[in-house]
Amino acid sequence: MEFDTIITNARIITASEVYPYLCSIGITSGKISAIASTLQPSQSTQVIDAEGAYVTPGGIDSHVHLHQDNASSGDKWLSGSRSALAGGNTTILAFATQEHKDESLFPVIDEYHSRARNQSYIDYGFHLILTKPTPHILNNELPKLASEGGITSVKLYMTYPGKRLHDGQMLDIMMTTRSLGMTTMIHAENADMIDLVTQRLLAHNKTTPYYHALARPAIAESEATHRAIALATLTSTPILLVHMSTPVALSHARKAQSKSLLPIHAETCPHYLYLTSQQLASTTNIHQDPETSHVHEEHDEWAGAKHICAPPLRHSEDDLQAVWDSLNNGTITVISSDHAPTRYDDIVSGKQKAVEAARLKGDGSKPTFAATPNGLPGIETRLPVLFHAATSDKVPAARRISLEKFVAVTSTNAARLYGFGDRKGVLAPGYDADVVIWYPQGDSKGRTVIRNAMLHHAIDYTPFEGHEVENWPRRVLLRGKVVWDRDVELRDGHGKGLLGGAGDGQWLSRRKGEVLVGRSGGGWEVEGMGSGEREAWGLAIGNTPLIRLS
Ligand code: DUC
Ligand code: ZN
Ligand code: ZN
């Protein structure tokens, strides 16, 4: 047989085009080996008819938290990757955290490898959260990690005790990551502003979940974003601002991008496109009985805590619109889920932790938003809610995206940005056969009201409870193997559509990432740095005049 599998009648979408005619995709040894207007079914024993539906590259969720630090609650690799797969993902990038001073990176990475090994349904890689940038780490370990360890990205925090880096540390790290060509991700929020507002709110008895959104004001994100861009500019370091949520912060990114001097990439998440801080004021829990499908509501003063995340959900429809606009005008490079889940019912490390802490005090103390862990689940819902924006006529024009944009921000860009764009994120011969087949447009089987009971994570809620989408990944292929079939799931019951197994996911050793924004589509220049090719990142800072951020 010429092909292991053929997908027929596929309406292929890439980051740059929607194929104008239906195609067949031939798959051999896990790779796409042919795309043609027709391939003969007799050329393969396995033929999958896409029935004219859209076919997209497997989703790449490049920012998820699974079994991180020592969190006891939340998703570990098995449940997290399972949920990712049922939502159309074939690759996830999660975080490994350096926690202790003078801690070598290698045992940390080994530990995270051991947590994920044989536990992932889909391919995976790690970013390093760098918290203690000693000279030894920067000069000896980071270069080795990037060149031999297959980890070519770091995340830096400007907030949180234990993780927060000061500007001098950020500059030192940026000089190193620039020279190594590592992708530098930044969580930009001003820690001192947040501390001040939090203390004042608590002192005035403003403790309920809603105040979380006030405690981390937009200006804390916009100030830190501007500062991060300035630090990157001084050191000529390409950066990626993660989970961006505010109009002003996005305008800083856009302005820096439009000067075309330095690549400033921006990431956002579905919750900043769809949800506002009103969610934090909720006092209702919604449950669906998995047996009867009956949906019932119960009053719960703390229910809004389910929506505590950082940066917080913002306040108005205008805030959401600014994120949609930034997506459509090209400011945003990638949309991740930032799946950072803890269970609501967990009193040790979940959203009920604050309630339990107050109860244990026994003096009538109230639970506080400040004692509640940050983060939302979203690994399974990311693709369906965004595909809805790309395909549904019911969505207002200002909140639509093109199909090409959908593929770019949910798959292709992440693969390129994080150094595996030569293997994944594209439907073309030579690439891994990571494929999502959707339901044909208008097929009622795709229409889905999102209920937590149907999701495959280990979390007891979804912030998208009750949201309706018109389509859902029908089949998913991971390197040519059918690992998700929703028709089986709908027919045979929860979990039955997962045809793959926890050993299917392979660890991805990554190369240096590509720069995706800036002058002439990838090439970029920094004043005083000569030709400005990426090789120039290694030039000494002494050769680089300061660039004014105006
Ligand atoms: N940062 C993240 O990236 N995820 C969850 C919480 C946070 O602060
Ligand atoms: Zn973060
Ligand atoms: Zn995160």
Image (tube, helix red, strand yellow):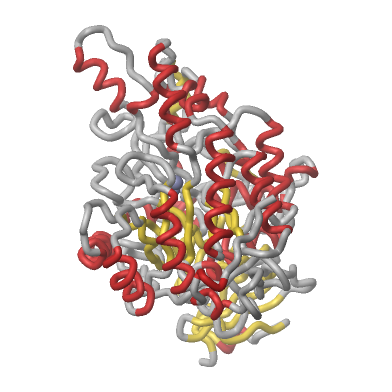
- Image position of 193 with respect to 515: above or below: above
Residue 446 on image: x %, y %: 61, 50
Residue plotted at (28% across, 11% down): 365
Residue 475 on image: x %, y %: 53, 62
Residue plotted at (51% across, 69% down): 541
Residue plotted at (63% across, 50% down): 386
The quarter of the displayed image where residue 164 is located? top left
The quarter of the displayed image where residue 125 is located? bottom left
Residue 378 on image: x %, y %: 48, 45
Q: Is residue 287 left or right of residue 117?
A: right
Label total for image: 0
Q: Is residue 54 left or right of residue 542?
A: right
Residue 475 seen in the current view? no
Residue in front for this viewpoint, 13 or 449:
13
Residue plotted at (42% across, 70% down): 152
Residue 50 on image: x %, y %: 63, 67
Residue 180 seen in the current view? yes
- Image position of 94 with respect to 451: above or below: below
- Image position of 548 with respect to 164: above or below: below
Residue farthest to the top, as pictured:
364
Residue in front for this viewpoint, 146 or 426:
146
Q: Is residue 335 left or right of residue 24?
A: left
Residue in front for this viewpoint, 527 or 377:
527
Q: Is residue 133 left or right of residue 228?
A: left
